[in-house]
Amino acid sequence: MKNVNVNGRSYRWPERPLVVVCVDGCEPDYINQAIEAGRAPFLASLGKRGTCLTADCVVPSFTNPNNLSIVTGAPPSVHGICGNFFWDPDAKAEVMMNDAKYLRAGTILAALADAGAKVAVVTAKDKLRALLGHRLKGICFSSEKADQVTIEANGIADALSLTGMAVPSVYSAALSEFVFAAGLALLKRERPDVMYLSTTDYVQHKSAPGTGPANDFTAMLDRYLGAMDELGATIVLTADHGMNAKTDALGRPNIVYLQTQLDAWLGAGATRVILPITDPYVVHHGALGSYATVYFSDAGAVADAAQRIAALPGVEGVFTREQGCRRFELPPDRVGDLIVVSERLTVIGTSAERHDLSGLDAPLRSHGGISEQRVPLLASRPAGTLPQRRWRNFDAFDLGLNYLR
């Protein structure tokens, strides 16, 4: 049976359908609390019949870097996607990092398809579709634009008929349910060798583990995963990042407005703060996350500014480009002179006037830092002898193809 080699790692050919699921924003306690409440019987069963690990995601703990790490089996230093948003020095502009031209490595999905595997990808938000489907000969579409699919662009002519659902609002739990409903229908109809499903964290941004909406969401995915398991698929579940409250004891947002501080210290225009959490879907987080990178016009100002930033309340760590890229496995040419990470209960903004929090109808919850790095890595089948190593969310395909019995 042939192996497929991708980015320095070898993957065995799937013996049965493999479904890898990335649950956006899935702090492990979402699963634990739903199991405790009796809402997730399939996930609860994995403790005896499957494989249950806790893994580390990529920092910055944002959607794009981690989804691309999962499907390439490699960190951002290899695949190049180090945020949802970055400063493009060639364009001299702040841009979304959702164009496949920014991707520097091939995906496991494309390699398996090239080798003859039947591959399907369903993602909630369309911002990931082009990256996940880069050079993929197979099915790849998003819930967000399921009504716009074509054979040429998506490998499927009619995605809506798979689920019987209308196109959901991008700000809804239904956007993720569409992913699972479509995945289950594809498993029944197409029997893909490998399928990748990626959700949205709308619910997790609004609801803490154990709350009604959070348990409802986990119960929903549990039903679909159980149905896929009954069809004989191997399921591996992980997350792109965790999620934490970013508030004080009264529920008010804890925000470090970093651009405002730097402007006060060094003058306007001396620095540029980039928030890689930024994407088109800011209603539920206001473009506020726990990671930022800073560019300086004067390299001589970096060291003093780093000390000042580190002394700000709510800041967990400040790293030079070299330090941060080494620690977090990031591409140096896509990171500023400093990397700033905030503490668990704090987010980083630029300036107050640049963040619209009017859409928040619940206390702010977000991600991006080291405190959101721990994520589940669960499988529906037992494993053979597992190596004693630091498991990462981007080991999902390695676990699913190389270790499960």
Image (cartoon, helix red, strand yellow):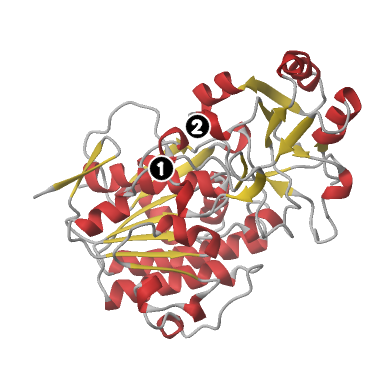
CB atoms at circles 1 and 2 under 8 Å apart? yes
Q: Amino acid at mark 2?
A: Pro
Q: In the displayed structure, does residue 202 sit left or right of residue 73?
A: right
- Residue, disc 2: 331
- Residue, disc 1: 104
Residue 7 percent location from the top left of the image: 30, 38
**Residue ranking furthest to the left:** 1
**Residue ranking furthest to the right:** 264
Q: In the displayed structure, does residue 46 sit left or right of residue 311?
A: left
Residue 24 percent location from the top left of the image: 54, 53
- Residue situated in front as seen by the camera: 47 or 386: 386
Residue 374 percent location from the top left of the image: 53, 37
Quadrant of res 323: top right
SS type, badge 2: loop
Residue 198 appears in the rendering: no
Q: Label 1 neighbourhood size at 10 Å, few (<14), some (14-19), many (20+)?
A: few
Please report the residue visible at 61 percent of the width from the left and 45 percent of the height from the top.
91
How far apart are labels 1 and 2 at the CA level? 10 Å
Q: Which mark is residue 266?
A: none
Please report the residue visible at 52 percent of the width from the left and 51 percent of the height from the top.
31
Residue 305 percent location from the top left of the image: 78, 19
SS type, badge 1: loop
Residue 299 appears in the rendering: yes
Q: Label 2 neighbourhood size at 10 Å, few (<14), some (14-19), many (20+)?
A: many
Please report the residue visible at 83 percent of the width from the left and 55 percent of the height from the top.
356
